[in-house]
Image (cartoon, helix red, strand yellow):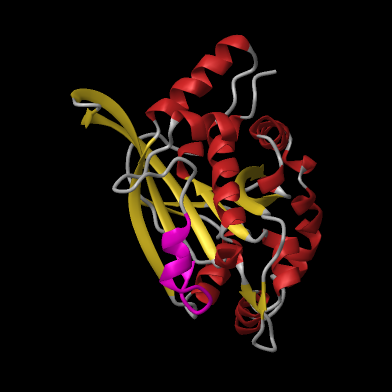
Amino acid sequence: MNSAEHDGFQVRPFFWARRLVVDTGRAARHRHPIHGLFEADVTVARRLLRARGQQRARLSFTAFLVGCIAAAVDAEPAIHAYHDLRGRLVIFDDVDVGIPMELRVPGGSFAFTHVIRRADKRSIADIHREIRLVQADPHNSPSLRLADKARAYLMLPPPLRTALLGLLHRLPHRQRALAGTVGVTAVGMFADGAGWGIGFQLHTLSVVIGGIAKRPSLHAGRLVEREFLQLTVSVDHDVVDGAPVARTKLPGHRSGTSGVSRSSSSRCLGPPR
């Protein structure tokens, strides 16, 4: 079906890939997420990234945050556990982070999930290189090898598709293979500006990286301009209680703040090379 022009409006075919998003939303309705919206002072982290960029290839802020989130999950692995069909908890040793990457195809574009494997054990530079490689050519992602299977899946009746996606959450090893153990959506990859976002609950732990706001803040006894990153942390309350989530902090978190300190930023970035 082609687009049609009418008096005052257009009629276009519904892009086939959007049906995957619709199915995902329907499946996510059966989970019971809790959401936490907070801010992190990332002034020092961004300053260190800019300083490294003057000496060598600049590292992306998204890669830095993926590495820090993976390190935080590694310190409290229960927050990326999954229930299997027998009601047991499966907790993986490695933190595999699924992030959305944009793919342009005839008829439109959509975000597919690329999984960064063992993100908790890799350097930020290594994560950065992988993200850039997939951004340059999405076909470098193993996820795109499933494109033919996705089209075959869309030929199934909608209720069956929704049931299959819902079942994925109870098949931990399949979930990990297709979407990773932790979901990180970086809104800043697609748009600028401050703000929070709440997405579908596809993982036990999902983090939406929002925008960055500059505003005055009392720091070391002086009123100075600082950069604050908005973060939304969502967890599946069927799997995780509040205590493990409360214990999970980005490196450099201090009581009463959600900061990323110079020492923690250096630890995530790794030693200078």
Asked whether 98 or 39 is in front, the reply is 39
* Residue drawn 76% across the image and 57% down it: 147
- Where residue 90 sits in the image (x, y, percent)? 68, 74
**Count of numbered marks:** 0
Q: Tell me where residue 191 appears, x and y as whole percent.
A: 43, 37
Residue at image x 38%, y 53%?
Answer: 197
Magenta range is 234-248
Where residue 50 sits: x, y (%)? 50, 18
Q: Where 44 falls versus 101 (above or below)? A: above
Quadrant assignment for the N terminus: bottom right
Up-down: is 262 above or below 119? Answer: above
Observer-nearest of 6 and 229: 229
Taking 206 as reference, is 187 above or below it? Answer: above
Residue 166 lies, in percent from the top left, at 61, 78
Magenta stretch holds residue 241: yes
Image quadrant in which you'd find residue 222: top left
Task: Compare residues 56 and 248 and report the one nearer the observer.
Answer: 248
Residue 147 lies left or right of residue 242; in this view the side is: right
From this view, report whether residue 19 is shown above or below residue 232: below
User: Where, quadrant-wise, is the C terminus in this rendering?
Assistant: top right
Q: Is residue 66 visible?
A: yes
Inspect the magenta stretch and tell me whether residue 258 lies in it.
no
Q: Is residue 110 visible?
A: no
Relative side of 145 to 28, left or right? right
**Residue at the location (79% across, 65% down)?**
149
